[in-house]
Image (tube, rainbow, N blue to C red):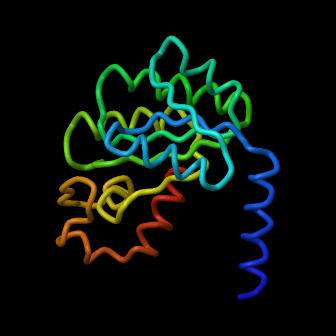
Amino acid sequence: MGSIIESCAKAADKVRDICPLVHCITNYVTVNDVANCILAIGASPIMADDIAEAADITSISKALVINMGTLNARTVESMIAAGKKANELGVPVVFDPVGAGASNFRNETAKRILENVKISILRGNLSEMSYLAGLEVSTKGVDTSEADEKNDPVSVAKKTAAKYN
C-alpha cells in the first residue's frame, strides 16, 4: 500500500512542478468544478470549445479532456479537431462519453470520436461502457441504469479496452 501512496505523491508533486495546461472541452454543468479541480491539483485549466481555436489550444496543452455531457453539434467538430491535434502531438486524450447509448446523436458522436481520435483514457459509467462494448443497454444518462448493473464491470472494461485498443 505504501508504494501506491508514494507513487501518487510523486505524481502529484510532478503535476505541481510542471503546472501543465489542460484543455477541456467539457459540459457547462461541470465546467466550473472541472476547472477548480484542475487548479487544486496544481495544473492549469483552459476551456476552449470553439472550432476556431480548439486545435490551437490543444497544441499548447499537456492533456485534452473531452466530455459529451452537454453535447451539441457545434462542439462535436471541435472535439474531433482537438483530438486529432492531440494525437498528432502525442498529447494524452481523456474521453468521457456521457450518455452513450441514450440517443442516436450521442451514439454517433461517440463512434465518430472513437474512430477519429486515439484515446488514452476512456472513462464512463457501466451503462456507457457496456454500450461501447457492444452490449444491449438501457442507458438513462449520467448514471448506470439498474438493468445494466447485471453486467460484470471487469468483463465490460476488458471488452471495451480490447475493442478500442
Q: Tell me if 60 is positioned left or right of 30 in this view.
A: right
Residue shown at the point (21%, 37%) measured from the top left: 104
Q: Residue shown at 51%/43% (left/top)?
A: 35
Q: Nearer the viewer, residue 156 or 78?
A: 78
**77 over 161 or under it: above or below:** above
- Report the residue at 26% width, 62% height from top: 143
Q: Nearer the viewer, residue 4 or 37?
A: 37
Using the image, determine if residue 10 lies above or below residue 134: below
Q: Residue 113 vs residue 126: left or right?
A: right
Residue 119 at what x, y percent from top left? 57, 44
* Residue 151, position as x, y percentages in the image: 31, 74
Residue occupying the point 34% across, 65% down: 126
Picture quadrant of residue 150: bottom left
Q: Position of residue 90 (x, y in %)?
A: 73, 36
Residue 57 % position (x, y) = 62, 23
Is residue 78 placed above or below 135 in the rendered structure?
above
Of 136 and 153, which appears nearest the observer? Answer: 153
User: In which quadrant of the rendered image does the N terminus lie?
Assistant: bottom right
Report the residue that reaches farthest toward the bottom: 1
Instruction: Residue lying at the far top in this picture: please name it.
Output: 52
